[in-house]
Amino acid sequence: MPELRKDPIIGRWVIISTERGKRPSDFPGAPKRKKENKLCPFCPGNESATPPEILAIRPDTSEPNKPGWTLRVISNKYPALRIEGDLNREGVGIFDKMNGVGAHEVIIETPDHNKDLIDLSTKEVQDVIWAYRERSLDLKKDPRFQYILIFKNQGEAAGASLEHSHSQLIALPIVPKRVTEELEGASKYYGYKERCVFCDIIRQEIADDERVVIQNDSFVSLEPFAPRFPFETWILPKRHSASFDEIKKEDISALATLLLETLRRLAKALNNPQYNYLLHTSPVNNDYPEEYHWHIEIIPKLTKVAGFEWGTGFYINPTTPEDAASYLKELEI
Amino acid sequence: MPELRKDPIIGRWVIISTERGKRPSDFPGAPKRKKENKLCPFCPGNESATPPEILAIRPDTSEPNKPGWTLRVISNKYPALRIEGDLNREGVGIFDKMNGVGAHEVIIETPDHNKDLIDLSTKEVQDVIWAYRERSLDLKKDPRFQYILIFKNQGEAAGASLEHSHSQLIALPIVPKRVTEELEGASKYYGYKERCVFCDIIRQEIADDERVVIQNDSFVSLEPFAPRFPFETWILPKRHSASFDEIKKEDISALATLLLETLRRLAKALNNPQYNYLLHTSPVNNDYPEEYHWHIEIIPKLTKVAGFEWGTGFYINPTTPEDAASYLKELEI
């Protein structure tokens, strides 16, 4: 019997359609197809093909915007938003608009064109997370920005236009709709229970141990109770924290370890799937310090879904999160 | 300068990133690739390969579940939901679930395997719309169902698993999230203005004439002010009506004409794109008769978007709706 399940945070129902049950091997994988690309603007030696670096990890002896770096943050050459100008919020009859002011940055995770994030060392992934935090803290100082959105598109079908491994950061003058929904849902739950809904989820999931993939002292990675997609996986800090940039130095290393192992398990289970991950954190104003709980959502791109899901907010998922968790957990990696 | 625009119904902001402006020819089309498929269960002669028909248009002289039909409605052989059983709503710790009870039907729009919806006559499309209405009215009688969702996936990338032209209907024991958001937004607007937000949009769009594609006495097809996707197109009845199944017989013909011409213009402009359309109507209880306004949303599948948009509710659209409307309007078809 298919089952309807409700997401406890934003109240979205999804269908877990077990009768269309899919094993990991039923999904087409995305075999690696990296090629030496002489024109890759993210490769060392081509620094002049990108806007100047905002942040880099490089030896003191090396010059900015020259080779020698191990991680590099630049402005997006084709930004979705522009850093200059005022918002000029205004009406157009019954409609509302404002200028597309914001920052759009690219975190080049490695100088090696042939490596994906999962091929990096824990130390290198730590540096990536450190860069996320540094850029967040810096951009938060700009009073025009309400939200700092960090995400990664891995693979062409997941929206990556360049194959050299990178993440993106967008600073926005508004809070994205999904985050607003999470804030409202979490705040409603808190109003009723006086407990963080994410903390309650983590406690129940660890006790049940049905949907947990892996955990360490500081983080847990799990399949959510009402996932939209097969093998949708969340990573959450075990200790309550609303804002990602509050992360402590020692926890950056714990997060790097857990993120890397979770991604490697997904890669092995699903034959290197294309994927997206998104970091959901508090808005800049941090108005919900007790209610909200930052986390990472990893979404492998496995099923063909399109306008239907966008148009309805309604998802049919052929794999139960319990099956996905037990499969991922038992993998030898 | 990119522009941020707010959807006046559900309050979602989108970026219209004109600097990445795309002409229709920049999008890869989906050239027709229909092939004779001997095993197509939707073709005449193969009726026994599908569940028995629920509704059909066929001459009085022809037998059910035999050839002779021009339109056929059947249960989905692999339904996402099951028609038998009770909901048994229950909790699992802090989570909520219920049985996946519902109906999942397929409307086979034509006996001709080689025709898409846009190749049909106005009369044939009228029959398709008539079938949507008949099945909606019938399924509404079942007290377990709260919502009747009608949609079409055209093309493999848009989620169609069989290429023979068809639409789908799902009767649900819940209201999908996007519809709930529209109901809440429309109801908030009505509370303030005592007018339907959709009626106000239609009035302003027809007066401005910047985003209207085509119209007739009863319907208008337009590019919304804050579209998520390039060439996203909505069709709305000009006279206020909350529920699609209230449609009058004479309006079915006007809708068929407008739907067909809109889809043909999109097909010509974008080289036969794959697409989805969704019919947003009132829930079965019709609790918002003055506030809500049914409509069709057509979403061509042109851009590679994935988990990022699902994870954030945040969209970057490279084509302004004004450009899309003027292009579609001026096409010779």
Image (cartoon, coloured by chain):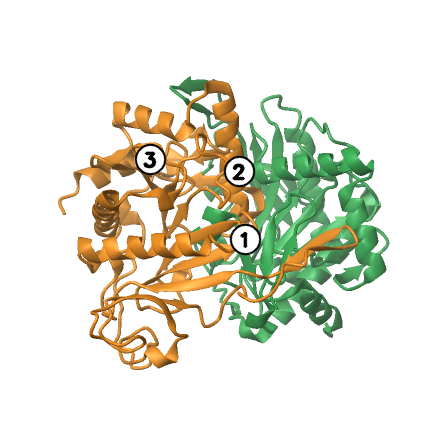
Chain colours: A green, B orange
Label 3–label 2 contact, CB within 8 A: no
Circle 3 SS class = helix
Answer few, some or many: residues within 10 Å of disc 3's Cα (few below 14, many 20 plus, some between 14 and 19).
many
Chain ID of residue with mark 1: B
Residue at 48% in and 32% down:
A81
- Name the residue carrying label 3: B321
Mark earlier in primary sequence (3, 1):
1
In this view of the protein, which residue sits in the foreground, A220 or B299?
A: B299
In front: label 1 or label 2: 1
Residue B118: mark: none
Q: Which mark is residue B143?
A: 1
Could you tell which of marks 3 and 2 lies nearer the N-terminus? 2
Q: Indicate the position of residue A190 as horizontal and vertical percent values.
A: 78, 36
Mark 3: amino acid:
Pro
Residue B145 visible, this angle: yes
Looking at numbered disc 1 in the image, what kind of residue is underneath it? Pro
Residue behind mark 2: B181
Q: Is residue B217 left or right of residue B283?
A: left
Q: Amino acid at mark 2?
A: Glu
- Residue at the spot 81% in from the left edge and 43% down from the top edge: A249
User: Looking at the image, is mark 1 or mark 2 earlier in the sequence?
Assistant: 1
In this rendering, the answer to whether A318 lies above or below A126 is: below
Helix or strand or loop: what does disc 2 sit on?
helix
Within-10-Å neighbours for mark 1: few <14, some 14–19, many 20+: few
**Residue B12 vs residue B248, the one in the foreground:** B248
Residue at mark 1 to residue at mark 2: CA–CA distance:
23 Å
x and y, in percent, of residue B131 in the image: 32, 57
